[in-house]
Image (cartoon, grey):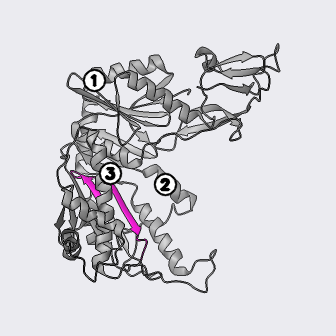
C-alpha cells in the first residue's frame, strides 16, 4: 500500500453514479529461486472480475520459448551478458473496493480509482504491454516484425536487445554504457526491480560465462519427480527402452492403464532422475549459420499405424527448436513419411529465418538435411507418380520453397541424422552420441568448469 501511494497508483474517491467497483482480496505468494529457496514474500491484491462487465479484452503477447532460445544463442555468439528486471507494479478507468484491512476511517464507502492498472486484473498484462511498447518505441527502439515482444535499439554501431515476457524483461547489449542508460530510463519511467545478471527465467537455470551459456531445468525436474513420488527412483540413461512395445489395450479402462504403459512412464521419470545435470550449451564460438534436420519413423505407432516426425533446427552448434510429433494421417510409404517430416522442418526454418532477420541476420539457401533420397527426389522432381499423387497438397510447399531458393535439400547418412533422436527409442551409445551432437551437455562440462574456476580465481584475488 505504501508502494501504491508513493507511485500514485490509486486515488480514494467518492463512487461515481452506476459505479460497479471490483472486489479485492489479499493474495500472498513465495517467490522461489533456482534452488527452491524463498527469495521474496510477495503480497498482491486479488480481484473478482466478470468478462463484459469489468473488462473486455485481455489478450497480451507472450514470447515463445523458441524465441527465448534464439536470443540465448544469438547473445552467446556475440558475447553479450543478459540482464533481468521485472515490474513491481503494473490505462483505462477502473474502480476497486478498498483493500481489506486498509479501509479509510473517514470514507469507508469510497472506492479507489486506479491511475495505473494493477497486476492481478484480467486486463493488466495487455495494458502493461501497450504501455511498455509505447515507451520503447518513443525511446528509439524498433519492434521485431515477427516477434512483437522483441525490441532492438541501434546507436553508434552498438546494439541493445530487449525481450519482454509479461512483467519480466531480459536485455543485453554490445555496450555497457547503452545497457546502463536503458536501466536508468526504465527506472525513471517505471517502478522496476533490477535483478542483475540473468540466472533464473521461466523455470530455466541460466549460467552465463565467457565461453558460452548453459541452460538447464534442474529445479523443474526435481519438482516433477517429487510431485509423483519418484525422487528416490533409480536413474535410467535413456528415456525409453528399444524393447518396449505399446499396443492397444482394447479391454482396459482409461483410469487403469496396462502394465507396459505404466512401466514406460516410470522409465521416463527414471530418465529424468538422470538428467538434472544435463542442459543446452550455447557456445560463444558458435557461428550464426542456420540448418535443419528432418527424420521420420514410418508407421511407428502400433495402434493407429501413424508415423512420427522428428525435426530439429540449430543456429550454428546451438539447438534452438525441435519437435517430435505424430503425423496427422497414415502414410502409405516411407517416402511420404519423410517428405511430410521435411515439410514440417521447412516451415520451422522459414519462421526462424524471418525471426532472425530482426537480428540483422540474412540467409541464402538454408540446408535441410534428410536421410531419404526418395523424399529429396520428390521435392526436386516436378513429375508426380503413384507414390506421391495422394499426398496432401499442403505438404508440397516444400517443393515450392526449394524452387524459390529458400532451402537446400541435402542428403545425410542415417548415422549422422540428428533428428533421429526425436523419432524412436535408441540404444544407449547412439542416444548419447546424438544427444551430445545437438548440444546437450553435462553441468560438469570442461568449458563450464573452467568458467567457474576462473570466476573463483578472480574472487579470491579480489579478496586477497
Q: Residues within 10 Å of mark 2 (few under 14, many from 20)?
A: some
> In the picture provided, is 250 more to the left or to the right than 182?
right
Place of residue 89 in the rendered image (x, y in percent of width and height, measured from the top left): 56, 26
Q: Which residue is mark 1?
A: 176
Q: Which mark is residue 107?
A: none
* Crowding near the residue tagged with mark 3, few <14, some 14–19, many ≥20 C-alpha atoms within 10 Å: few
Q: Position of residue 378 (x, y in %)?
A: 22, 73
Can you give x and y, in whole percent of width and height, for residue 105 in the image? Answer: 82, 15
At x 56%, y 62%, the residue is: 228
Quarter of the picture holding the N terminus? top right
Residue at 29% across, 73% down: 338
| Residue indicated by mark 2 | 222
Residue 351, labelled with which disc?
3
Question: Within the magenta stretch, is there residue 444?
Answer: no
Residue at x-position 47% and y-position 44%:
35
Front in this rendered view, residue 89 or 39: 89
Q: Position of residue 289 (x, y in %)?
A: 19, 49
* Residues shaded magenta: 313-329
Amino acid at each position: 500500500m505504501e508502494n501504491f501511494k508513493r507511485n500514485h497508483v490509486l486515488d480514494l474517491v467518492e463512487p461515481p453514479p452506476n459505479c460497479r467497483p471490483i472486489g479485492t482480496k489479499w493474495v500472498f505468494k513465495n517467490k522461489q529461486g533456482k534452488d527452491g529457496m524463498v527469495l521474496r514474500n510477495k503480497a498482491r491484491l486479488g480481484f473478482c472480475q466478470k468478462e463484459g462487465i469489468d473488462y473486455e479484452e485481455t489478450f497480451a503477447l507472450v514470447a515463445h520459448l523458441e524465441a527465448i532460445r534464439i536470443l540465448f544463442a544469438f547473445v552467446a555468439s556475440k558475447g553479450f551478458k543478459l540482464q533481468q528486471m521485472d515490474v513491481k507494479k503494473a490505462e483505462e478507468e477502473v474502480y476497486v473496493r478498498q483493500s481489506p484491512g486498509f479501509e479509510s476511517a473517514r470514507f469507508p464507502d469510497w472506492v479507489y480509482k486506479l491511475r495505473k492498472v494493477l497486476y492481478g486484473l484480467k486486463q493488466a498484462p495487455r495494458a502493461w504491454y501497450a504501455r511498455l511498447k509505447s515507451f520503447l518505441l518513443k525511446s528509439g527502439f524498433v519492434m521485431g516484425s515477427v516477434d512483437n515482444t522483441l525490441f532492438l535499439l541501434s546507436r553508434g554501431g552498438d546494439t541493445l536487445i530487449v525481450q519482454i515476457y509479461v512483467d519480466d524483461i531480459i536485455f543485453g547489449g554490445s555496450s555497457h554504457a547503452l545497457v546502463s542508460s536503458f536501466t536508468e530510463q526504465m527506472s525513471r519511467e517505471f517502478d522496476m526491480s533490477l535483478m542483475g545478471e540473468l540466472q533464473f527465467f521461466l523455470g530455466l537455470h541460466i549460467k552465463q560465462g565467457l565461453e558460452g551459456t548453459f541452460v538447464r531445468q534442474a529445479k523443474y525436474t526435481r519438482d516433477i519427480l517429487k510431485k509423483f513420488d519418484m525422487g528416490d527412483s533409480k536413474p535410467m540413461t535413456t528415456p525409453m527402452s528399444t524393447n518396449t512395445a505399446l499396443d492397444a489395450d482394447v479391454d482396459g479402462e482409461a483410469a487403469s492403464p496396462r502394465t507396459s504403459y505404466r512401466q514406460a512412464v516410470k522409465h521416463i521419470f527414471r530418465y529424468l532422475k538422470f538428467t538434472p545435470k544435463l542442459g543446452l550449451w550455447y557456445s560463444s564460438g558458435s557461428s550464426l549459420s542456420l540448418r535443419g534436420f528432418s527424420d521420420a519413423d514410418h508407421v511407428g505407432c502400433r495402434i493407429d499405424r501413424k508415423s512420427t516426425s522428428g525435426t530439429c533446427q540449430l543456429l550454428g552448434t546451438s539447438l534452438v527448436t525441435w519437435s517430435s510429433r505424430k503425423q496427422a494421417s497414415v502414410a502409405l510409404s516411407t517416402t511420404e513419411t519423410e517428405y511430410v517430416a521435411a515439410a514440417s522442418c521447412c516451415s520451422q526454418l522459414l519462421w526462424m529465418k524471418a525471426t532472425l532477420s530482426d537480428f540483422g541476420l540474412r540467409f541464402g539457401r538454408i540446408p535441410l538435411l534428410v536421410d531419404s533420397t526418395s523424399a529429396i527426389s520428390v521435392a526436386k522432381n516436378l513429375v508426380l507418380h503413384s507414390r506421391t499423387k495422394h499426398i496432401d497438397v499442403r505438404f508440397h510447399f516444400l517443393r515450392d520453397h526449394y524452387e524459390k531458393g529458400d532451402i537446400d535439400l541435402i542428403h545425410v547418412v542415417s548415422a549422422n541424422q540428428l533428428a533421429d533422436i526425436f523419432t524412436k527409442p535408441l540404444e544407449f551409445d547412439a542416444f548419447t552420441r546424438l544427444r551430445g551432437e545437438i548440444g546437450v551437455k553435462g553441468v560438469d562440462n570442461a568449458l563450464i568448469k573452467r568458467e567457474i574456476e576462473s570466476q573463483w580465481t578472480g574472487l579470491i584475488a579480489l579478496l586477497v
